[in-house]
Amino acid sequence: MTSRFLQLLAALLLTLGLTGCGYNDFQRLDESTKSAWSEVVNQYQRRADLIDNLVATVKGEANFEQETLTKVIEARAKATSIQVTPETLSNPEALRQFQAAQGELSGALSRLMVTVERYPDLKANKAFADLRVALEGTENRIAVARNRYIKAVQEYNVLARSFPSNLTALVFGYQAKENFSVANEAAISRPPRVDFGSSPAAPAR
């Protein structure tokens, strides 16, 4: 083990005088990915907080479909129970579970918004309307935060896999970070559809 470490270190020092080891770049990009991830988590938490208020408002509507509301409540509880810290972002299973839970919440929320269209009094409720606007804005913030994280991770991973900075990664233990998967990208990043009109849209002719 010691011999291999010395060989790697020698190779690293050999390339240092030509192109630099990239150590400082790893520090900068690692902090960049952590900061970008924190913003993703913050925006998802903002959505979860808004959903609490949204659910409380919907509960006040007589005869509202409880199954739809229950699924939102359960999905929110599941999504907020899964914590992925910057230190565990290299764990593909942890990120997959986080993505799946957030995607499930997005789906439940979309179905709730569709159901609301059948309740004119609830649609006309100012508090509910304000929450819908705030929720749409948060969904947009989530999309922006996710895109920033994706780009930050891509930049970091290119450095980790490129020569000669990949030698630095080997010596100092920098591993490629997990990113949002392509399979879940569309489902999670697409905001729930919200119709802000006072009545359903007219059918296409």
Image (cartoon, grey):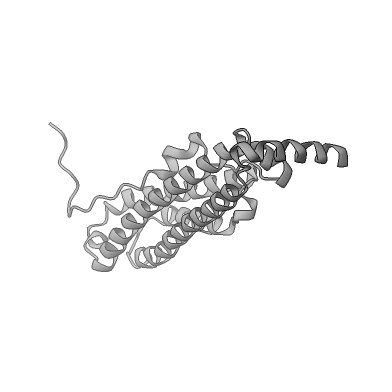
Choose between 7 and 92: the one closer to the eye.
7
Q: As drawn, is 25 to the left or to the right of 135?
A: right
Choose between 117 and 43: the one closer to the eye.
43
Choose between 132 and 70: the one closer to the eye.
132
Q: Is residue 1 visible?
A: no
Q: Residue at position x 59%, y 38% from top?
A: 19
Q: As drawn, is 63 to the left or to the right of 4?
A: left
Query: What is the x, y in percent for residue 26?
Result: 59, 48
Q: As drawn, is 132 to the left or to the right of 161?
A: left
Extreme residue toward the right, this view: 2
Q: Quadrant of residue 203?
A: top left
Query: What is the x, y in percent for residue 101?
Result: 53, 49
Q: Residue at position x 31%, y 47% from top?
A: 193
Q: Residue at position x 23%, y 67% from top?
A: 126
Vertical arrangement, residue 119 with respect to residue 163, above or below: below
Query: What is the x, y in percent for residue 75?
Result: 50, 53
